[in-house]
Every structure is written in structure tokens, then in C-alpha cells.
Image: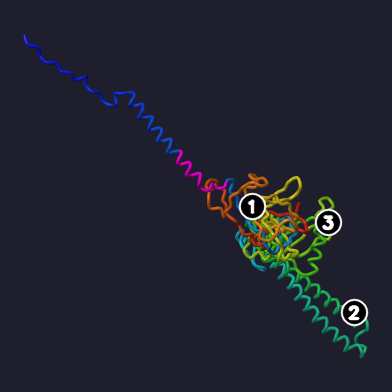
Amino acid sequence: MTAEPRHLSGPPARAWYRRPRLVIAAIAVLLLLLWWWHGAGHAANADKPKAPQGPRVDTAKAGRADIPLYAQGLGNVQAFYTVTITARVDGQLDKVAFTEGQPVKKGDLLAQIDPRPYRAALEQAQATRDKDRATLENARLDLQRYETLAPQDLASKQQVDTQRALVAQTQAQIKNDEAAIDNARTQLDYTAIVSPIDGRTGIRRVDPGNIVHASDTGGIVVVTQLQPISVVFTVPEDALAAINAAMARGPLAVAALSRDNNTELGRGNLALVDNQIDAATGTVKLKATFPNQDNKLWPGQFVNAKVLLATDRNMLTIPAAALQRGPDGVFTYVVRADSTVEARKLKLGDDSGALVEVADGLKDGETVVVSNQYRLQPDAKVRTADDKSGAGDKSDGGKEQEPPKADDKSAGASAPGGNRAGSAP
């Protein structure tokens, strides 16, 4: 019996992924490669300059500007003239000739009262005068006859004197008749009620068909003059000396602002300073007149008013937003060349609201921080508009602002305070 030959080859080969040791070694190699690549990247980034750290801030440069000086106060608008239109005679109101809220001119018809009784009274007075004129003419003729007969003793002296007295009496009666006619004509004229001023009508208070009386106090309508218009406001008594001194130099301009100080409503001139100070409040009343061509000022409206007293020329200024107050007084953050900030104590002069005059503590051209001061402390690093590197805090702005011009409009739109003449309490 012959034996079959036996194959000497080993067991069949297994795939590489079925060998755990080989898989673990491959994973370890991959992790080492990732670790090396990550470390090399950090090393390369370490050679790059780091972005400056710190909050992004808005800045402005200290510069020269004119500072207007104001006396400011709170007041209300008053119509230049206010007239309550009432009936001056009794009668039925036949017609209302105006529309509520309508502009009217002086002499325009507003209402008509039934004129018939007053026209009849006028005609009666005229008839009485005509009768007395005829009597006077007859008395004069009789006087001439008596004076002709008296030298011939055909008329007594007493008759002549009596007739002369009758002529004088009739002449006086005619004067009385003329006065009665004038009165009756005036009463008739009163039945046509006209506007005594240029202005605007208000709400109608009486309807046609009602009986009106001269003794009525409610009136038919109120007419107010809006062009020009007045503003009466108060300022602290400490400002009185500066106002009087400025008035001695010439007329003073007054600006009327909305209650939030953001909208200028009109410009006018100071008309007068009241003749006494209110002892209870320590304020004095001022009255200004405005052309009010655009009707932005309305009677009863509350406004902020400011009187321009003088202007300081070419003063070193910074925006009011740059000011901070601390235990040692007023200061501002100044940006150094290395983008760090310094808390600089300031000595202030006058201000216009938008700009503040710096008497000491800053130089012309230095950069101050006007936003995000609450995130700063001395020597802190900041990012400004000139700093182009770095990211983050984009919403903070980072714009460098030029100092706003200290004209009347920008100054009036800012919150009041700190001017030489004092601010309204």
C-alpha cells in the first residue's frame, strides 16, 4: 500500500486588519504624526506678531474750536396776542363765518348777530335828529323876525331873549341826536364781529341760532397770534449779571429747542428781562420773540431756551463724551503711542454742551478716548481705528472722531450744563 505525499506548507495567511498588534501600531504612528504637525504649526504661529489685546475704543483729538457761551433755561411758548372773541351786543347769532383752526387776518368777519333791531334804532335816532333840525330852522327864522321888530318896539326884549334861548336849546338837542346816532351806528357795527388781530382761530364755542349776550364770558372763539410768537423761560439768578452785561452790548440771540434738546425749533431775540427775581426759586424770567414762520412753536408748548451771551475764540477743546469723573475730580483717558491709556486729570473752562474747553491737562493734538471708558484702567492696552491687526469687539466701533464744530446747532443739541452763565436747574 502506497502512502500519499503530505504537503509541508503552514496554516493559511490572515489579512492585516485581523492582526490587533499591527492595527495598534499603525494608529500610534498616525497619532505621532498628528502631534508633530500640530506642534510645528504652533511653532510657526509663535514666530508671528501677536495681535494687541484690549478693548476697542473710539477716540478723538484735542483741537481748537470756538466755544459759544449760553444762559439756558426751561420755559413755555406763549401766543404774542390772545383774544377771546365775545359779543358786545345782545342778539341771536345768525352766522359763524370762520372754520375752526383757520388763519384769519385783522378785520375778517368771524360771526354775525341779527342786525335788524340795531338798524331800526339807528334809523330812529336819525329821524329824531332830522326833526330837531327842522325845529332849529324855524326857531332861527322867528329870532330874525323878533330882532327886526324890536327896534320899532313891535317885539319886546323878553321875546327876543326867549327866542334866542330856544335856538341855542335846539342846537344842543341836535348835538345830542348826533351822539345818539353815533351810538346806534356803533351798536349796529358790533353785530358784525371781526378779528382784531392776525392769528388763528381755535375751537368754536357757540353755534349759530343761540342767543348771545354782552355779559357772556365764555366767548365765541379764541384767536391767537402765532407769527411772531413769544417764549417765556427762567434762568438762575446767578446768570443775571452776565445777561445784563451782554444786553448792554447789543441784541441777544435766543434759540428754542425741543424738550430732549435734540431739535432746534426756532431762533429769535431776547425781548426783556423781568423786573424782579422769584425769591422762592431763585430764578428770573426772560421773554424772547420768535418769527415762527414755520409754526414749529405752538402756544403752551414746553421748550428749552438758551441765550447766546458770548463766544470764546480758538480754545482747546475735547468732546464732552471724553470726560470722566473720579474721586480726584474730572479726568480723561489719553492714548499713548504704545496704545496704552493714561488717566489725565483736567482743569476745565467753559463748555457748549458738545465740546468742553480744557484749561489745563492736555495739549493740542493729543488723542482721548470717547467710548468704552468703563472697560479701561490706567496703563490698559486699547485698540483704536489706527490698529488694523487683531479681531474681536468689532461692534465696539474703533473710529477716531474729529472734534465736532462748536456751532449753535451742535451745541444746542447737546445736554445743557456748565456754561459760564449757569444752567437751568
Q: Can residue 298 be seen in this view?
A: no
x and y, in percent, of residue 170 in the image: 83, 77
Which amino acid, by three-letter code, is at mark 2? Answer: Thr
Name the one closer to the observer, 251 or 130: 251
Are the residues at dot 2 and dot 1 in contact (C-beta closer than 8 Å)?
no
SS at mark 3?
A: strand
Quarter in which the N terminus is drawn? top left
x and y, in percent, of residue 279 in the image: 85, 52
Q: In which quarter of the image is residue 156?
A: bottom right
Q: Which mark is residue 370?
A: 1
Instruction: Looking at the image, tell me whether mark 2 or mark 1 is earlier in sequence order.
Output: 2
Instruction: Looking at the image, tell me whether mark 1 or mark 3 is earlier in sequence order.
Output: 3
Which amino acid, by three-letter code, is at mark 1? Answer: Val
x and y, in percent, of residue 135 in the image: 80, 78
| Residue placed under numbered mark 3 in the picture | 277
| Residue placed under numbered mark 2 in the picture | 162
Label 2 crowd bin: few (<14), some (14–19), many (20+), radius 10 Å: few
Which amino acid, by three-letter code, is at mark 3? Answer: Ile
Q: Which residue lies furthest to the left in this view?
A: 1
Span colored in magenta:
39-52
SS at mark 2?
A: helix
